[in-house]
């Protein structure tokens, strides 16, 4: 069982729709990271959060530590949001914290 | 530049050859990670360096893979006797000390073993 689970695996939306991507993890973490990977492979950091909620433009990330769950929301989606979104939880490993990645959510936004 | 720099960006090599991939982390970042992403797959952890501590090598897939970090800065990932299944994008990330710090990724090295 992957320690970091993302859903859905694939997501198709029409421009303007509100999008939610979910991430759940199985053990206590120090922080959770949302990443965006565009075709071509470059990875961009979106958010790092350890509690509460963060907002940047049309992107909102929330985390519930007790429920071991985080969500990434995209408001008023646009075709340029099409990418793979990856959550990474820093899981304890022998006294340090190693980022463990979900399998990613592939988002396609149609005009 | 201010970001994580990886070189080369692309590498094509013949099966059986050795390759070296380089990562220049952000200045001052004490943590450095190597990951790989095979075609259509998620990110796979390879190795983690933190300061002067012994590296966490738990993700290295075989003894053909090794990595070092000189002077707490530049890191080199070496793959000996490359195999076709080693073909992947190799990504490096660095972060400052602390469990709640953000990791910054390089653009990766796309390795193709023919």
Image (cartoon, coloured by chain):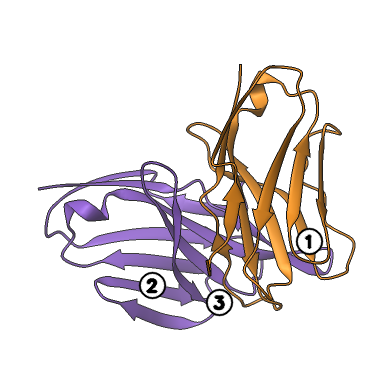
Residue A16 position within the rendered picture, expressed as x and y whole percent measured from the top left: 11, 60
Question: Which of label 1 and label 2 is nearer to you?
Answer: 1
Please tell me which of labels 3 and 2 falls first in the chain: 2
In this view of the protein, which residue sits in the foreground, A26 or B92? B92
Residue that badge 1 annotates: B49
Residue A29 position within the rendered picture, expressed as x and y whole percent measured from the top left: 64, 71
Residue that badge 3 annotates: A66
Q: Could you say which chain is coloured orange in the image?
A: B
Q: Is residue A68 visible?
A: no
Name the residue located 46 percent from the left edge and 52 percent from the top edge: A6
Are tags 1 and 3 found on a single chain? no
Q: Is residue B88 left or right of residue B57?
A: left
Q: State which quarter of the image contains the N terminus of chain A.
A: top right
* Label of residue A61 in the image: 2
Is the residue A54 above or below the residue B55 in the image?
Answer: below
In this view of the protein, which residue sits in the foreground, B33 or B11? B11
Are tags 1 and 2 found on a single chain? no
Name the residue located 55 percent from the left edge and 46 percent from the top edge: B108
Name the residue located 46 percent from the left edge and 74 percent from the top edge: A63
Is the residue B57 above or below the residue B39 in the image?
Answer: below
Indicate the secondary structure of the residue bearing disc 1. Answer: strand
Chain of the residue on which disc 2 is drawn: A
Indicate the secondary structure of the residue bearing disc 2. Answer: strand
Q: Residues within 10 Å of mark 2 (few under 14, many from 20)?
A: many
Question: Which of label 3 and label 2 is nearer to you?
Answer: 2
Q: Could you say which chain is coloured purple in the image?
A: A
Is the residue A9 above or below the residue B94 in the image?
Answer: above
Q: Is residue A93 left or right of residue A67?
A: right
Q: Residues within 10 Å of mark 1 (few under 14, many from 20)?
A: many
Residue B81 position within the rendered picture, expressed as x and y whole percent measured from the top left: 79, 23
């Amino acid at each position: 069982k992957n320690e970091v689970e993302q859903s859905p695996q694939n997501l198709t939306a029409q421009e303007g729709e509100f999008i939610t991507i979910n991430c759940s993890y199985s053990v206590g973490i120090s922080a959770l990271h949302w990443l965006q990977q565009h075709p071509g492979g470059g990875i961009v950091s979106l958010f790092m959060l350890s509690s509460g909620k963060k907002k940047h433009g049309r992107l909102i990330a929330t985390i519930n530590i007790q429920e071991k769950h985080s969500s990434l929301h995209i408001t008023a989606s646009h075709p340029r949001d099409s990418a793979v979104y990856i959550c990474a939880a820093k899981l304890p490993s022998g006294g340090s914290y190693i980022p463990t990645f979900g399998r990613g959510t592939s988002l396609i936004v149609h005009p | 530049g201010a970001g994580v720099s990886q070189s080369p960006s692309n590498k094509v090599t013949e099966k059986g050859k050795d390759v070296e991939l380089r990562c220049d982390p952000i200045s001052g970042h004490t943590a450095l990670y190597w990951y790989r992403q095979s075609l259509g797959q998620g990110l796979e952890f390879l190795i983690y360096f933190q300061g002067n501590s012994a590296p966490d090598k738990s993700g290295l897939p075989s003894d053909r893979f090794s990595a070092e970090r000189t002077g707490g800065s530049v890191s080199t990932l070496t793959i000996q006797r490359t195999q076709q299944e080693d073909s992947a994008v190799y990504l490096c990330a660095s972060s400052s000390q602390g469990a709640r710090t953000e990791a910054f990724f390089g653009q990766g090295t796309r390795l193709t073993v023919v």
